[in-house]
Amino acid sequence: MTRKEFIKYCKAIGIGLPVFLTLESCTDDEVSVAAPEFEVNFSGKVIIIGAGAAGLTAGYLLQRENIDFQILEASSVYGGRLKRADNFADFPIDLGAEWIHTEPSILAEILTNPNIQTDIDFITYNPQTISVWKNGKLKKNNWASNFYSEYKFKSTTWYGFFENYIVPDISDKIILNQPVTEIDYSTDMVNIKTNDGSVFEADKVLVTVPVKTLQDEYMDFIPSLPTEKISAINSIKMGDGLKAFIEFRERFYPDILNFGGLLTGNESDEKIFYDAAFRKDSDKNVLGLFTIGKPAGVYAALDTEQQIIDTIIGELDEIFNGKASENYVQHVVQNWSKEPFIGGSYSTEFENSRTGTMNTISEPLDNKIYFAGEALSDENQATVHGASETAYSTVEILLKN
Amino acid sequence: MFAALLTSNIIAQTKKNVLIDFGYYGPYAIQIGGKLGTSFELTTWDSDKRHKIRHSLNISPQIGYFINPIQKELQKNSFINSEILYKRQKSENSLYPTASVGLAYMLGVQSTGGTVNLGTGNIRRTTRTIHYFVPTLNIGFARDPLKRVGYYFKGFYGRRISKQVDGSGYFGLEFGLKIKLKKDHD
């Protein structure tokens, strides 16, 4: 059960029917994964804006269909909110998306390539020691480990997954350092201008940038986006986001530390400290901080990384009686709120109907401008696989028309 | 000596009636499972001669199994449990309160990870086994079968204790039926 599901489920506790199963020491889950068969009525050129999970997946699919395309990425690296710290610990660390919020077989469903016969390790992320810091007291709530479980990569990361299995097929199509400033779809062909004056031309454009980038109107659309689409874009909340990892000489913290109560959190405002080395093959003591929304804003608003880490260490010292300062070794901070062309965490709240908002934004413009990304996934919004899922559905529509 | 008395008492009772309890067993309210047990009287005494209130101490051996219904692969637990149960009955077929203390040995099989094949999506999971002792306090009510079928309901609270993992609170609900397998001969 994911954190989201846990909170929802606990609000509507029900009693199921008894199920009796036999004990096994290991189990196999058989899954059926098949490559999608798109109806392809299009043979022109596509420009994908953004090389995050949705953009990279879309490129991967277009490559498979032999469609001419390019991916324009604003920053100097691909990945978007997928990011990795390689040399911090003795295992790779996800500075961005980290958890697999569904069954691990989703990795095969993203690739839909039966020819890949690689096994990849995952861990069941089911923290065993759970504490809550509330009103100045640290309280154990280990019983909650019966409710919460997700998955993580064991020896790679979300970034590594895309780097190894998606990007190799399309790396020559990714152009970095190309922030798009204008998308002109007033003529038959779409003209795309970037901030260094480069101009690209395509039959269709797939916009996969974070919703915050659209809200900030970094890109001018000519003609302007329809009013209802702009309203829908602005009705999505994408709050602050920050992750930090701190190595300590000794471990003094539980597997996961919540703030204020296990059931008082909401999807928009989260803050947890967690053992980042949980079930990894690691000799290091690495504590992670994941925070979004209001709690993240406290850190994200600070001017320097040193101020952020001082604040975090100060908090940990209060909770663990000075042990953080005593055992501190090194840290890495990823302030997503200040990351250029990202500007926050991920979509968390919709002012109006979520499905209606997504449908309004996803609606193609003149069969030339398409939209995809985590915010537009109806079932799996705010996840990497949700972003990839929207790439599948949008590419299907794009190729059909 | 006590064991011999207890054994002879239980053997005598099994020749007469056997009460089987079975039903839903739900730790943490949302985990689901089942439990099967029986009970034997250790001793009885009466109080309040006018209203004939009967008190009894019973021993109740049980076996059970439960899983997490949301993620069935997360954990599977089987246990054997023994409770010392106090009953206070106004009459043989009345609803009566129960209180008991129990001690269970529990075997938990927990998913720790595994591998996923990127071509097929097939998953091979690895698990670990955790041994627990679980002392509990149980409070509820029950009605013994008048002819064949009665019922019980109780809540339990205790602690899972293990050398392998940190201890954790353990609580939940259970309810089910009490079945009389043999008719009284007297």
Image: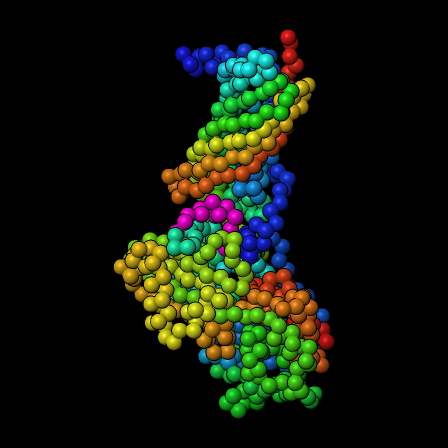
Q: How many marks?
A: 0
Which is more toward the observer, B2 or A276? Answer: B2
Which is more toward the observer, B183 or B109? Answer: B183
Q: Quadrant of residue A232?
A: bottom right
Q: How is the image coloured?
A: rainbow
Check residue A144 for magenta coloring: yes
Q: Quadrant of residue A104?
A: bottom right
Asked if residue A82 can be seen in this view, the reply is no
Q: In the rendered view, would you say B169 is above or below A62?
A: above
Where is residue B157 shown, x and y percent of the image? 49, 36
Where is residue A378 shown, x and y percent of the image? 64, 64
Which is more toward the observer, A242 or A98? Answer: A242
Q: In the rendered view, would you say A330 is above or below A10?
A: below
Where is residue A51 shown, x and y percent of the image? 53, 75
> What residue lies at 50% left-to-right and 27% top-to-bottom?
B100
Q: Which residues are magenta?
A: A138-151
User: In this view, which residue lies farthest toward the top?
Assistant: B186
> What residue lies at 41% left-to-right and 55% top-to-bottom?
A135
Where is residue A303 shown, x and y percent of the image? 38, 76
> What residue lies at 47% left-to-right and 50% top-to-bottom?
A126
User: In this view, which residue lies farthest toward the bottom?
Assistant: A197
> What residue lies at 62% left-to-right and 18% top-to-bottom?
B91
User: In this view, which residue lies farthest toward the front?
Assistant: B50
